[in-house]
Amino acid sequence: MQIYHVLYNIFMLIIYITIVALIVGYFISRVKNRFPTWAYILTAFTGSLVGAFLAFGDSFIFLKYKFLTLETSLVSFSVLATITLLFFDKNKTKLAIITILIILGSILGVFYVDSSPSEYNGLFREELNRAGMERGGQPVEGFTAFMYLDSFPGILEEDFDGVESYEGIYKIDEGELSYTRLQDHPVTSAEDVISNEGYSTLLNNISKRLNIEVKSESDIAVLLEKIREADTNQSSYITDGFSVWHPDGWYAYENGSSVFFTHDENLTVPPNTDGFALGSYFQVSVETLDNESGETMTEGQYFAQNLWVEGSEFLVSKNKAIINGLNLTRVVTAAAGAGGEVLHYVFYDEPTRIITLSQYPYDENSPDSEEFEEVVKKFQPNFIGDAPDRSAIVPHDTGVNGRVLLGPTCPVQRTPPDPNCADRGFETTIQVRHPDPTRSSLVTSVESEEEGSYSIALPPGEYRLQALGGNPFPNCDGKDIVVERRIMLEVDLYCDTGIR
């Protein structure tokens, strides 16, 4: 039924175009009959077709001028094209019609070149949207300038000067960014959402400020990475048992099997100090699950030991969570011996240890608690080895290595293969990103050696490898990989030189 509906709509559109052409062509031919009536009707028909084509897609003239519809566009271009015949000599019919066709074709081309985002503008919008969703969530209508400013420290207010929205434009006024509405029709909830044309302007503004000429996908990647360089710096803290990344302003102090993070840069931690005595803090502790009798404690027994069970006066809530591929238990408890609540994330690494991340005082609206939630997202355990007693901690030796190869290096491949025409190593940047489109931020990047070899240590998980090429060559491929525990994957990446 759907195909019949489409065919019916096309048939009715052709009928409408024909009727408009007949009416417009006939009446304008009566004004000054320099050409045969059929010439006026043919010209009117051609103008109607151009108007119909312009009415489809995301043409910016239809976003700017709401009075333009399919009907008004057909009539307007039909009249404009036919009136042009009034200014031509009757003996130059072919010249007149060809001229009109060229003019209408040029108008159509200009409108669609300007209104359709370029390949790189589309990529820029897609990647910026993905990163924006990762940082600030999915907006209902789309992203506004102020949403991006909240999410990206590397984007400045000046970058939005002249950026178009669906119903207005952003301007820098007396050094501050403001939004001006340009439409008279009723206000919609998407009035200040950046339009396709607006992303093109934004890309142009940012590329000029960063002095990056965008000619390839790799240039977009470099530009986005420059934006991310202004993000809040995070420092890594790595132990034999785990690694975490913490924001600036938190300082680490080891205390037995735990590590405390506080805002005090010069804190002296007495041995066996309880975390509650430190005030605002978060803590990561690693505990073995073997009791004095040599039996292994279960996760339930661990919770019971801490009175984090149903019916306990200390338990506020407890539920499961999957974060960064890890199965965690999220527990909120009353602070024993102190006021307020404590947030815990518990990772049960059966059968020998349990890792607990805790934050006090917990308040879901406080900056400290929000930063702790981000810390948990970056937490990675260093997994226990394969020895029979599983007592030794294996170094962080999971990840991927291989070579970046450049080829072909000769215009003609020979049989048998010529050793001088073999693929050679390529020195470039390899980026590691999340394959999930909602998590587009760069995980890490490395430079391959002169012979093309590279090695990247990564926690277990899914990733996207991308070697950066040139414009237009070499054109480098990317690969999706799955990193498993205690395994170094062997993955070669290939870059096409374009030589044939």
Image (tube, rainbow, N blue to C red):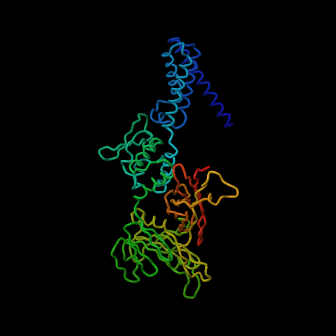
Query: Would you identify the image quadrant in which residue 343 lies?
Result: bottom left
Tell which of 89 and 11 is nearer to you: 89
Relative to 373, say whether 297 is above or below. below
* Residue most extreme to the bottom: 293
Image side of residue 118 versus residue 145, left or right: right
Tell which of 68 and 206 is nearer to you: 206
* Residue most extreme to the left: 174
Relative to 109, say whether 427 is above or below. below
Image side of residue 133 versus residue 390, left or right: left
Query: Which percent across, then down, holds residue 110?
Result: 49, 33
Query: Which percent across, then down, holds residue 167?
Result: 43, 39
Relative to 4, say whether 46 is above or below. above
Query: Which percent across, then down, holds residue 201?
Result: 43, 43
The N terminus, quarter of image: top right
Query: Would you identify the image quadrant in which residue 339 lies?
Result: bottom left
Relative to 131, say whether 299 is above or below. below
Tell which of 450 and 66 is nearer to you: 450
Q: Which residue is drawn at 39% across and 46% down?
A: 160
Q: Which residue is drawn at 64% across and 60% down?
A: 419
Numbered-mark total: 0
Query: Which percent across, then down, holds residue 402?
Result: 58, 65
Tell which of 411 and 144 is nearer to you: 411
